[in-house]
Structures are given as C-alpha cells and as structure tokens.
Amino acid sequence: MKSYTRYVCQQCGRVVASYMGRCPQCGAYNSMVEEVVREETTSQVQQKVRGLNARSMPRSLGEIGGEVEERLRLPMGEFARVLGGGIVPGSIVLLGGDPGIGKSTLMLQMAMEMAQRLRVLYVSGEESERQIKMRAMRLLGNKQPVPPELFLVTETNLNLILNHVQELRPSLLIVDSIQTVYLPELETSAGSVTQVRECASQLRELAKSSGISVFLIGHVTKEGMIAGPRVLEHIVDTVLYLEGDRFQAYRLLRSVKNRFGATSEVGVFEMHENGLKEVPNPSEAFLAERLVNAPGSAIAVTMEGTRPLLVEIQGLTSPTQFGNARRTPNGVDFNRLLLIVAVLTRRLGMRLAEQDIFVNVVGGLQIDEPAADLAIAAAIASSERNLPVRADAVLIGEIGLGGELRMPGQMPARLREAAKLGFKTAIVPKAIRKAEPWPAELQILEARSLAQALELALNPAATPSRERKMV
C-alpha cells in the first residue's frame, strides 16, 4: 500500500500538493491541514468490489414495498414539526449552531424525553459524564427521576463507540460532537476533513443497516457554516440549524435539508433556566412587547416554511454626524435594505442620503424573503415623517425597482394568521387574480405602488382608489 501527503483546506475542501498559508480557492488563512493518503492496490480494490456485489442485488421498483414507515413519536412538538412529524428510524440528522446557542441542551432534553419509551445512548466527546448529569438534573428541576434507559458515555474513538452501540443496541444514538470523533487508523487529527467524512460515513452505514436513528451535533465556522466543509450536509438525511442571538431568549430551529419532510420549516423555543421551552404561538410572543402607535414600527407577515409569523419591524432615521450615512440592519439582509432605501429616495423623493438608517427585527428573527419589503419601507418612512403606522394593520408586499408592489406567495395563509391575532386591516399589493377567498374579518386595502401603500399606512383617514372587503 503506497502513501503520500497532501493538504486540504478545512473551509472549502481544496486539495493542494504542498502547504500554503492561504487557500487559493476561498482565501482563508492557516486553514490547510496535512493528510496522509494511502492508495490501495488493485487486488484490494477488486476484493471490495466483489464484496459489494455479493451484498447488493438489483430489484425491480415494483417489487420494493412502498409502505410509509412509522415515525418515532417525539413529545417536543416544535422539534417534531421541523423533522416532518417525528424521528424516522434509520435516519441520520445533523444539528449545527453557534457555540453556546443551546445545541447540547436541546439534544439532552430530547434524549431524556425519548428515554421514557426507548433506549438512548448519548456519546459526548467534549464533556464528562458528571457535567452531563449536572445539566440533566438542572433540566429536570431536581424533582423528576432520571430516565433509566438513558445511557451516557464519554468517548471519541469511533471504534469503541460502535462497540458500545453493539452491546447496548439503542434505538437512538446522539454524538456530541462529530468533530471530536476520530478513527485511529487515519493519521489525521480529529476534526479534519478526512476524519469528519469517514466517521460520518460509518455512522450513516450504522443507521441504514441497523435502523438506529443517529443525531450528530456539528460545529460551525466563523461564517456560520457547518465545519467540514459541507461534506456532512451531503452525507446526512436532515440538516438542522439552531439560530438566535445569545442575548435573546428565543431560539429558532430551522430545517435546511430534509429527505423525509418539508425544508425551511422552523420551530421556536424560548431559553429558560431549566432548558428550552416550546413557543406554540410565536407571532403572539414576538408582538408581546410592542408599543402601539409608536413611529417607526410596522408589522410584517413572513413565512417560515409552512408557518406564517407576525413580527414587528422597527425603523429609525437620524441625521448623520459624519460624511457618509450609515445603513445598519439587524435581522434584515443588508443589500435588501439598500434597495428599499434607494426606492424610497428615488421614487418617493424622501431625503435619506443624509440620514443614518437603522432597521431591527424584534425577537432576533432573520427575515430573508422579500414579502417584508413593504413593512421595512413603512417603518423607515414612519420614523422619517414622525407619523405612526396604523396600529391595526399588517403590511405585506414585495417592492420593485420602479416603486411598484408585487404579490408574494401564500397570501391567504398570511392573512388568516393576521386575522387570528386580532388585526383588522391588511395593506397588500393589488391582486390580479385570486386563487381562494381571503378572510372576511380583514379589511383589505390594495395598492399598486409603494406611494399608495405608505399613504394608506401613515394616514388612517386616507381612502384607497379601490377598497375591497373580501367575502
């Protein structure tokens, strides 16, 4: 068996023959890690091929059973929603997030709840068994008994972990974290691209062959991506991200890949002393501390997967004290904010070139869809004119470069959520065609342009050119 040395970038996976201080592909400094690669001989490769052919056998698609496999019921409703209804036996799930955001806490809570009915093995490579026990007692409140079917082990050698799995035969395996696990036959350090790829591949084979559901906790880079680089996301069945501001109480569990359910689903949790608690009505929680009739505040309805969420968007304009005006978004895409400010300046004649503009999404939510454009523009215009937005109105619409409003998708679901929370008015783009009836309890104010929409939002006495109340 021949061997040679190569260097792999931990950020982008670029392979080079000699060490380089800066990756030629992604530009990251000091990201090259040395790897020793062993080339297999032709006979070894042929033996593997023969073994593979001996195990597998092509079958007609009609001969394969198509019954839907029953999922493992998960008591945490928000978690089950993101997974698509529960845990699929034999699946492998990757959970990523910033340090200290609550990944280990969420996994330990899930492990203790699942251990009431199933055998669970929690493998930790970062904490001792005593530390995990202390966290478990804090989550239980020192009152409830520890589930007897929850087993802990602190181990980083994957071969020993697989031996423990063979002995215990758990229904659920949790590895915290995959970057600390290593295979001793590989001559690279734990966390390298080769180690992460090989360890995840063997855990995937374990899940598919034995039916054990595997959860992996993954570290993230400074760019917010799961370290690997992204090789883990291709290996696993489901990729979840736990997001939120460490100084905010709310945490968002988001699905970005799911082979067994819808992607872009989101679950909302609130951090307490005894762990993460589910938030069954996130819209009501995000609007709980809203100051009604305050200039610079508007309500947007954004879609997180199949769930509509009402969030408060705050805008503030202030005369700049320096040469260049600042644009500071929090929870909104920076380029999207520049586009909205440019439309307000060019199409509506607002003097924003000498104004510092700050936009904030209350609750730590990150909004990426353009349906919140109208609410962002209304919050900025409300602050600049010192006029409050209508307190009982939600604003939904995408802004074009010509100052026109465009209809976003899933409008009936957004309006139903607004009506459910007691809002009486919705300012939306003018509908060319309507697929299904809109809520009758909402007064629908249609606008063709951004100027018309702001006139309706900032002047309650204004009447639209065509006001419609859908029945």
Image (cartoon, helix red, strand yellow):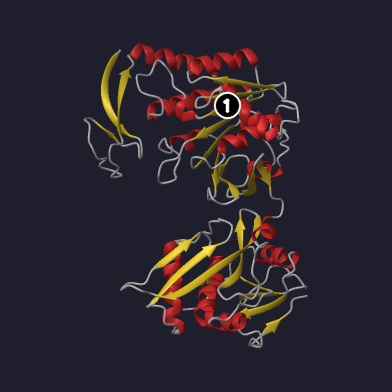
Type of the residue with mark 1: Gln
Quarter holding the C terminus is bottom right
How many numbered circles are shown?
1
Which residue is outermost to the front?
Answer: 142
Q: What secondary structure is found at the residue carrying circle 1? A: helix
Instruction: Bin the neighbour count of mark 1 within 10 Å (Cα to Cα): few under 14, some 14-19, many 20 and up.
Output: few
Q: Quadrant of residue 76?
A: top right
From where the camera sits, is residue 414 visible?
Answer: yes
Work out whether residue 193 or residue 31 is closer to the camera in this orientation and state it. Answer: 31
List x then y, in percent, for residue 459: 62, 85
Q: Which residue position holds label 1?
A: 131
Quarter holding the N terminus is top left
Q: Residue at x 53, y 56 (%)?
A: 366
List x then y, in percent, for residue 190: 41, 25
Indicate left or right for 133 with 142 as reference: left
Residue 268 drawn above or below residue 157:
below
Residue 465 drawn above or below residue 21:
below
Residue 233 drawn above or below residue 115:
below
List x then y, in percent, for residue 110: 66, 34
Indicate left or right for 127 with 285 as reference: left
List x then y, in percent, for residue 332: 49, 61
Q: Quadrant of residue 80?
A: top right
